[in-house]
Structures are given as structure tokens and as C-alpha cells.
Amino acid sequence: MEEKKFDVKSIIGFVLIFGILLYIMYQNQPTPEELEAQKKAEQEQVESEKTQSKQNETLVTTSADFTTNAQVLDSTQKVALHNKVGSFAYALTLPSATDKQTRVETDVFELKFDNKGGHLAEVKLKNFVDYDSVPIYMVKDNNSAFNITFGTSDNRTLNTQDFPFQPSVTKNGENTVVSMKLKVSETAFLEYRYELKPNDYMIDFSIKSQGLSNVFNTSQPIELDWKQKSIRHSKSISYENRYTRLTYMYDDGKVDKLSQASDDDESINDVEWLSYRQHFFSTILVANDSPFNKAAITSEDLVEDEEIDTLFTKLYTSKIPLAYSGGELNQNLGLYYGPTDNSTLKAYDKDLEKSIPFGWGIFGWINVVLFIPLFGFLSGFLPYGIAIIVMTILVKIVLSFVQYKQFLSQAKMKILKPELDAVREKYKDNKLKAQQETMAIQSRAGASPLSGCLPGLMQIPVFYALFMFFPTAFELRQKGFLWADDLSSYDSILDLPFHIPLYGDHVALFPILAAIAIFFYMKMTTGQQMATQPTQEGMPDMAKMMKYMIYFSPILMLVFFNNYASGLSLYYFISNLISIGIMLVIKNYIIDEDKVLAKIEVSKTKPKKQNKFQKKMAEMMEQAEQQKQSQQKGKKK
């Protein structure tokens, strides 16, 4: 009975509580005005979401959007991250995002790969040091950027530099394979694959994707962006910068360059390789399978003041659109980091050696066919300085017939000088007639000023070829001779406490010796030329010009070559010493002026047949003479 009463009381209590709750809810229900305000707020929220959706139709994501660093995320955070980067949010949740770099070493490289971006963050060449005994770095301290910009199917624009790649290092026989994967799942990813071979400066590099055909927006261009500042490696940054240049091969074997001394840009098609040359070292990107369809390249000179700008020489950039294949990427490339050495580059059979500035046309041909093999042979068993001297002697012996022709022409002109002076005196009031008679005498005697100039012109290809050879000869780098500790750089015997414009902050000895030798050689050769050189009305005073050249040429050598390779100055010094010796031998022991005079007399008696050029010149001079006479008659009337 008591138990029944308890149940009744409990029921009554629950009814009272329920009634009270209903009363409270009734009292707290919104008024009609509050319901209207709530409805209005909900409509505004819907409109706001629509506006935000329109703004996010194309979302460009930057590194500032990535606030997660491979931490364990809850469902809300995952949704927020996916809203930022779409399918690539998966990459930001992987453990690899916490690791900064992956290190790999080969026989020739010490490499560091940046896990964020998947690119090479540091490239050290183990077998070389710079002028200050510091290891050669091609890539270091963010001087290089290598990334891809691409669009996604959910209308985003992303860049690989903002994402962590998952690294793995494996072996493929003797080769080391570094794989960097930007993942959207365990089976779908964008991969940078680097295969490193023993004792090889060329890295097999591929950019491939797997399972991303539905992730990429193939209607939006995908672009490879490659930038690099060239790190200074030589004593003279201005000299090094002179041979630092962006070179490229395109259109089935053509080779061209951006400007050497100023900022430049170019848009090119069918690009086979791009060389970021830094004088004696180069970074080269090679299109292995097929040429890049096009590339936009730039070069910026970073050396405005060599006393201030001491770290970098040039900034190179290349923007290269990549092609999709079946909605995926599959690009096989080569990355070369190594010496700008002819034999090394030639071994890859891709014409990479054409990036070396041996000279254009016949000048480059002479270097490739003659001087490079010759110097390689001589330096194989001789010290490098001695090899330069021996090569100089051989070149001068071969060209000695040119000097003989020059001195023979000078001897003939010296013998004819009295006769030519008499003609000029006889026709001093008729300059045109004097010129005609002078040419006639020279023609009958087989002597002409041009016969002395033409053999000299034959030396120009050899002169220029050697001028290009020595600054690009990698074999001379850091090879000493006498007081010069590096034949590829200047041979300083005195460091100055100040900088002289155009000259530098040091005194090099080989250019001084070369300048002295040039002065005496020109003094001996031009002295005789000035004595035999006639001064003609309306023509420059050649004797006066030669006199100036005697002093101007040595000064030019002294100033301009103070920062040049000492091997080149050594060549000019030895070359002019040998030229002086050959000249003395020819003048004193080979050319006999009496015999030359006898030959001239015999030549005068023989009928001289004029060639077409001589006939044309005679006709022009005759017409000029007739015109002059007609004008004089007109004035008298």
C-alpha cells in the first residue's frame, strides 16, 4: 500500500516538473519581431556564402596558407586544410613535411635536396675549389629556385615550392636514385626523380605524375620556373662576368646567347638545352626526349660595381611551359652541374661543348680543330706554362712566311721610294696623275702597299682564335707557372690599396712584359713602314697614325690585360719576342736588297697584265681625271 502511494506522488512530481518546463518554454519563445529578424539574418548568411563561393572559383594558394606542419589533425582541421589546397592537403599531413633536407653524396657531388619543393637546395663540386680555396658551390643559400606552377580541377593555382615532398633514396645498380614525391594519396603523386651515376656530372632528372589526370586542370598552362644566381668563383669578378653568359641550343642545332654585358631577354622555340654558364662552370638543363616547345629566358647583370657587387655575377631565369600527355606529366630531362670543359661536355654527345665561347665562324673552327687538340697533346707531357711557350713557337714558325712577305714588300717599297718621290714631285700639281703613275710603277715592279697588308690580314683569324682560346681553356685553371699561381687568372705581383678604373687593384707582370715586347716590335716594324709610306692628298696621314699606334698598342695591352688570364699575356709576350727574332733574321740574313732590286728591274721589263680590279681602278681614275679637266675648262670660260 505504501509502495502504491509512492508511485502516485512520483507521477504527480513529474507532471508538475513537465508543466513548469512547458511554461518556461512558452515564456521564452521569440516574438513575431524576433522571428522576422532571425529570418533576415539567415537570408544574409546565404547571400554571403554565395558571394564567397564566387570569389573562390579560382583560388591561388601561397605558402602563407600552409599553417599545418605534419601534425595530427582532427576532422575539422582536415576539412579546413582541404578547403585551402584541395587534394594536395594530404601531402601536408605526411611525416616528410617535418624533415628539412635529404643529403646524398657521389664521387663528384655533395647534394642537398629540399623536402619542401623537392628541388636541389645545395650542389657542391667535390673536386674543385675557387680562387680562395673555398669549395665550388653551384647551388647554395637560396641562389637557385626550381618549381612548377599548375592548375587543378577545382580551379586552384598551386606551386610546388609551397608543398612538402616525401623523399626516398634507393639504389639502381651502381646508381643512386633520389625520389621526391608530392602526394595526394599513397598511389597518386607528382614525382621528381634524380638518378646519380658514379663519376658523372650529368643527373638524369624526370618530372612525372601518377594518378593526377583528374586532379590537374589540363586546360590551364603548366610552367617550369627555373632561376639561378651565378656565384662568383674567380679573383676578378669583372673578368669572370665577361665569360658568364646564358647560352642555348634551339631549332635543330642552332646556338645563340643572351647579351654578355647588359640585361637581356628572349623568347625562343624548340629549345634543346639551356646553359647557365659561369665562366669555368656551368649548369645545363637538357631536354632529353624532345625539345621544349618554347621558353622565355632572361639574363640580368648583377655586377654594377666590382668593389661592391662581389658575390654574384648574373641572374638567369627560364620559364618553360610543359606539356601534358594523357592528362599526366612525363618529362625526361638532364641536369648538368660541372666544369665548362670541352672534353667533359663533348662526352655527352648533345653538342653541349658549343656553349663554350671558342669564337664564331672560322675562329671557333680553328680552336676546335687545331689549338684545342694541339694544346691537349702538349700539356699531356709538358708543364702548362711550357706547353703555352712551345705552342706559341710552333704557331710563329708556321706563320713566319707571312712575316717574310711583309718584310719583302717593305723592302721593295724602300727601293722604289726615290722613284716614287720623283713622280710625286713631277706631278705635284696633279694629284690624280701622280696616283696613276705611282700605281703603274708599283704594278710593273711587282710591289704594292697592299701586298704587305694582305699577309698580315691572314694572321687575324689565328690571333683572334687564340684570344678566345686561353680565357676558355679549363686546363689552365689553377695551374701555375713561374710567379703566376693561376694561368687562367691574372698574375698579381703587387696588390694596390686602391682601385684604378679599367685597370684594377693590382699590378700583373705578364701584361707589362707583353707591352714592352709589343712596343719594341712595333718600333722596329713601323719605323721602316713610316719611312716608305707616302702621304697622299685626301688620305689619312698613315705615318702619323703608325706613330701613335707604337704607343697606343702597348698601353692598351698594359691596361686591358691586367685582369685577363696570365696564360694569354704569356702567349703575347713570347709571340712578340719570337716575332722580333724572326724579323731580325729575315732582314739581316734572308732578304738581300740588291737581289730584290735586280728582280724589280727584270719585272719592269716584262709586260704586266692588269687584272679586272686594276683595270677598273685605272678606268675610274681616268674618268676622274677627265672630269677634273672638264671642270677646269668650264671655270676658265
Image (cartoon, rainbow, N blue to C red):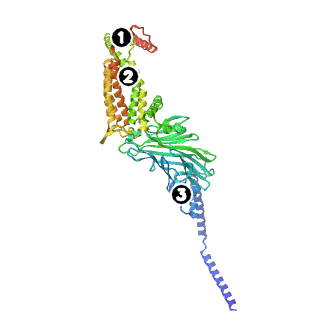
Q: Residue furthest bottom?
A: 1
> Residue under circle 1?
598
> Residue under circle 2?
403
Q: Residue 511 in the image: x percent, y percent?
A: 33, 34
Look at label 1 and name its amino acid: Ala
Look at label 2 and name its amino acid: Gln
Specify whether 293 is left or right of 403: right
Q: Residue 136 in the image: x percent, y percent?
A: 43, 46
Compared to residue 301, the image places residue 614 above or below, namely above
Compared to residue 47, the image places residue 258 above or below, namely above
Specify whether 481 is left or right of 52: left
In 3D space, how far apart are the residues under numbered discs 1 and 3 (Cα atoms)? 93 Å
In 3D space, how far apart are the residues under numbered discs 2 and 1 (Cα atoms)? 22 Å
Compared to residue 453, the image places residue 139 above or below, namely below
Q: Residue 461 in the image: x percent, y percent?
A: 43, 27
Say which element carries label 2: helix
Decide: marks 3, 2 in contact (CB < 8 A)?
A: no
Q: Residue 358 in the image: x percent, y percent?
A: 45, 33
Task: Please tell me how crowded label 3 is: few (under 14), some (14-19), or many (20+) other residues with Cα within 10 Å.
Answer: many
Specify whether residue 187 is in view: yes
> Residue under circle 3?
96
Task: Please tell me how crowded label 2 is: few (under 14), some (14-19), or many (20+) other residues with Cα within 10 Å.
Answer: many
Decide: marks 1, 3 in contact (CB < 8 A)?
A: no
- The picture quadrant where one finds residue 19 is bottom right
In 3D space, how far apart are the residues under numbered discs 3 and 2 (Cα atoms)? 72 Å
Q: Closer to the observer: label 3 or label 2? A: 2
Q: Quadrant of the C terminus?
A: top left
Task: Please tell me how crowded label 1 is: few (under 14), some (14-19), or many (20+) other residues with Cα within 10 Å.
Answer: few
Specify whether 566 is left or right of 291: left
Compared to residue 184, the image places residue 562 above or below, namely above
